[in-house]
Structures are given as C-alpha cells and as structure tokens.
C-alpha cells in the first residue's frame, strides 16, 4: 500500500519534509520501502518478516556474546549467572523484562562494540509493551535460553553461546508468530481492533 505523504502532511498540518524524514526512519527500520519517483510503500508484516527479525536478533546477540568473551572481564559469566538466577525467580512480568534487558545489556557492554549497538538500535521491537506479559511461552523460552548461554559463557565457548542465542531467539520468534497469527495480524479478515 502506498503511503499518501501529502494527505498525511495536510492532516498533521506540517510540510512534506517532516513526513519524508519520518518515512526515511521507517525505511531504516524495515517498515516501509521508498522507491525513487514512485513514493513510499508499507511493507507487509508476515510470518517470514517476524522470523527474519528474530533470526537477526539471534545472530547479532550471538556475535556480541563471542566478542564479550574475548573483550569482557573474567567475572562476566558470574554476573550473567546472577542476573539469570534473579530472572528465574522473578514473579512480576515487569521485573522479568528488566532483568532480561539487564542480561542482554551486560553482554552488549562487555562486547565493547559500538557497531553492534548501532545495528541493534536500527531494529525496532515488534511487540510493544511488556514482552513476557504479552507473549505466551516466551518466559520459559527465555529462561532456558539464558541458562544455556550462561553455561556456554562459563565454559568460555563463544561459538556455543552464539548458537544458544540463535536458538533462543528463533524460539522467541516462533512464539511471536503464534501470537500475531492468533490475533489475526497476518490475515486481514481475522484482524480485530
């Protein structure tokens, strides 16, 4: 579907320039495609796009885990184990989300790679709000995945940590796909407001 830039600008009471700038940002995030001399078009959100999104997260975080082992402090596996233990014991979805972010953030910080951060910033979240509260089964997947990543990090096995990240994110992507399918997001006939 083509994005009506002039209509949006008129409805918002702004010139086309801020609308165009917003579309450029959305293109970087994969939500639209801008075609020269044709305009901007909304990209479909389908099962393949969701799977690709989480596969990419797995690859990027897996790469970060390898870099973190090479560049991070020797106590990183213990720090991750502590966060993972707290994650497993947490009862509130808000706490679980904060601890998940802390775990991944510790890996990213230890990777000491601004490039990894740039790539991750370019990827937007597909599930707004509290992920573990909204995505059935994601908590169990993350809990098992974090435990496997900690084991690999303690063994100083970057390849295994990377593989475990990819596996976890693939399974999370499967859960998100099921959620979106159940809510009718892939089938416009089933979609509800």
Image (tube, rainbow, N blue to C red):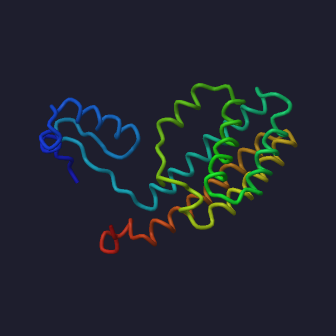
Q: In this view, does 25 lie above or below 188?
A: above
- Between 102 and 41, which is closer to the camera in this rendering? 102
17 relative to 117 in the view: left or right:
left
Q: Is residue 6 above or below residue 21?
A: below
Image location (x, y in percent) of residue 172: 60, 58
- Between 61 and 133, which is closer to the camera in this rendering? 133
Q: Is residue 122 above or below residue 85?
A: above
131 relative to 75 in the view: left or right:
left
181 relative to 73 in the view: left or right:
left
Going 57% across and 31% down the picture, which residue do you hit?
117
Going 18% across and 40% down the picture, which residue do you hit?
12
Q: In which quarter of the image is the N terminus?
A: bottom left
Image location (x, y in percent) of residue 116: 59, 31
Give the quadrant of residue 60: top right
181 relative to 105 in the view: left or right:
left
Give the quadrant of residue 73: top right
Image location (x, y in percent) of residue 53: 50, 50
Going 67% across and 36% down the picture, which residue do you hit?
64
Q: Quadrant of the C terminus?
A: bottom left
- Between 57 and 110, which is closer to the camera in this rendering? 110
Image location (x, y in percent) of residue 78: 85, 40
Going 47% across and 52% down the picture, which residue do you hit?
128
């Amino acid at each position: 579907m083509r994005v009506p830039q002039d209509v949006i600008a008129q409805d918002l009471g702004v010139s086309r320039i801020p609308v165009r700038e917003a579309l450029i940002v959305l293109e970087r995030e994969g939500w639209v495609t801008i075609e020269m001399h044709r305009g901007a078009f909304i990209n479909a959100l389908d099962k393949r796009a969701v799977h690709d999104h989480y596969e990419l997260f797995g690859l990027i975080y897996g790469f970060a885990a390898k870099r973190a082992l090479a560049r991070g402090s020797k106590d990183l596996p213990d720090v991750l184990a502590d966060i993972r233990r707290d994650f497993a014991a947490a009862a509130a979805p808000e706490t679980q989300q904060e601890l998940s972010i802390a775990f991944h953030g510790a890996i990213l910080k230890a990777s000491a790679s601004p490039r990894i951060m740039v790539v991750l910033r370019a990827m937007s979240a597909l599930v707004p709000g509290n992920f573990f509260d909204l995505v059935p089964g994601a908590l169990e997947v993350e809990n098992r995945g974090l435990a496997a990543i900690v084991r690999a990090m303690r063994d100083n096995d970057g390849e295994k940590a990377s593989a475990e990240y990819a596996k976890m994110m693939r399974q999370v992507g499967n859960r998100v796909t099921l959620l979106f399918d159940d809510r009718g997001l892939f089938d416009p006939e089933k979609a509800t407001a």
